[in-house]
Structures are given as structure tokens and as C-alpha cells.
Image: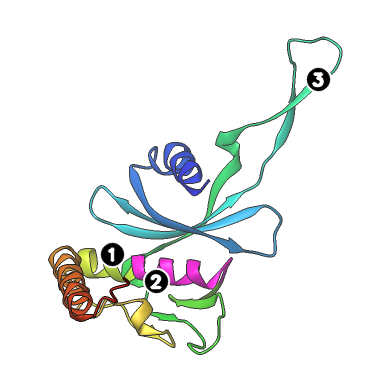
Amino acid sequence: MSSLLREEMQRVLFRPAKHRLVEFIEIEEPTPGRHFLCVSVGQKKVVQLSIVHCQISQSTQKSGSKKLPTKRSSIQECYKRTEIWSLHDLTLVDGRDPDVDDPCFLLHFDKVRTVMAITCSAKYTMVRALVALCDRYCQKPLNLQNFDFPYIKPTTYYSNRGDCVVLSQICFYACNLVCLSMCPVPLDA
């Protein structure tokens, strides 16, 4: 489902603005409809965070049948970017309390923007994406506060996932083989 949403938002909202949607999470907002916190990269490597509101507006259009009109939603009218910020303007991301599974976090721009993710996992997914994009495009570390850091930044062991993971798996299998070869096998007559 999320890949379909990603493709739809990319096609309808971000591609016409010459942006590439990198990451998005669903968030809760007081207004009706679905809301998303999106991160996109523009042509000049400008990274933007935006709140996207999806309000399905149903308009009556004539269908092939003359009996009853059919209600159809217009996808183009559905997605609207209601708030936009630059990643350069983000000074701090505050997770509020790292010891509690709280999906709420604070984005500090000129003003503080409270974001309520649907799940705590979505919150950490967005923060990992922001850290990676900040390292890549802003050449400065993103200030994080009140997060469980092992879930955000990879440790040195996992920093080079390709070779390290393969090597550790080979070592694990080799240790298992050695242990199994040392176990006595009961011989039943």
C-alpha cells in the first residue's frame, strides 16, 4: 500500500515540481483527511520537508448510465502541500522521551512544529531518513535530542553492511559446525 501511495504522490505532486520523494510517513492532524510528512529532493539538491494533506473531494460526474450520477474522486485535487520547510532550516529534532514508545516528535524551525506519527516505528524511519539526507546534502550533522540512538545511527559493526554481515554469518556458521563436530553422537545398537 505504501509503495502505491509513494508512486501516486510522486506522480501527482512531486514530479511536476521537479522533486523526488525520498521518504514519507503518515501523521495525525486535527483536520479531516489523511496527512503525510514527506521529504523530497529538488533539482539543485534542495531538500524539503512538507506536510501533505489528502482530502478526497468527491464531485458528481456523469457516468455512462442516465439513471444515477456516479461520484468519482479527482486524484489531482486530492494531494496538497500545506506546509513546506527546507532541511537547512531544521535546527533540532526532539523525540520528547526516548524511554517511552511515543510517536510524537518536535521539528524545530523558526517555530516548533509538533508531528504525531502513526507509529513509533514511522517516527524513527523519518528521523533515519533525515539524518542520512542531512549528512549527504547539508554536510552537517542533524541535531537530535531524546531519541534512542541505536535505532537511528548504525553502530560501527553495521556501518559497512555488505562485507561485515557476510563475514559475521560465515564465522557464525563455522562456529556452529565446530561445536556440532565436537558433540558426541550416541550409537544405538
Kindly state the secondary structure of the residue where label 3 is placed. loop
Range of the magenta residues?
Answer: 116-129
> Percent x, y for residue 129?
35, 65
Kindly state the secondary structure of the residue where label 1 is placed. helix
Q: Is residue 188 rendered to the left or right of residue 80?
A: left
> Percent x, y for residue 126?
42, 66
Residue 40 visible at all: yes
Q: Residue at x 55, y 35 (%)?
A: 76
Q: Nearer the viewer, residue 136 or 189?
A: 189
> Amino acid under label 3?
Pro
Q: Are marks 3 and 2 in contact (CB under 8 Å)?
A: no
How many neighbours does mark 3 have within 10 angstroms: few (below 14), some (14-19), or many (20 or more)? few
> Amino acid under label 2?
Val
Q: Which residue is mark 2?
A: 127
In this rendering, is residue 145 above or below 14? below
What secondary structure do most residues of the magenta stretch adopt? Answer: helix
Give the distance between the C-alpha atoms of the residues marked 3 and 2, in whole angstroms. 45 Å
Kindly state the secondary structure of the residue where label 2 is placed. helix
How many neighbours does mark 2 have within 10 angstroms: few (below 14), some (14-19), or many (20 or more)? many
Q: Is residue 6 rendered to the left or right of residue 47?
A: right
How many neighbours does mark 1 have within 10 angstroms: few (below 14), some (14-19), or many (20 or more)? many
Q: Which residue is mark 1?
A: 133
Tell me which label, 3 or 1, sits earlier in the chain: 3
Q: Nearer the viewer, residue 2 or 185?
A: 185
Q: Which residue is mark 3?
A: 69
Q: Residue at x 86, y 12 (%)?
A: 67
**Residue 159 disc label:** none
Residue 91 visible at all: no
117 magenta-colored: yes
86 magenta-colored: no
Tell me which label, 3 or 2, sits earlier in the chain: 3
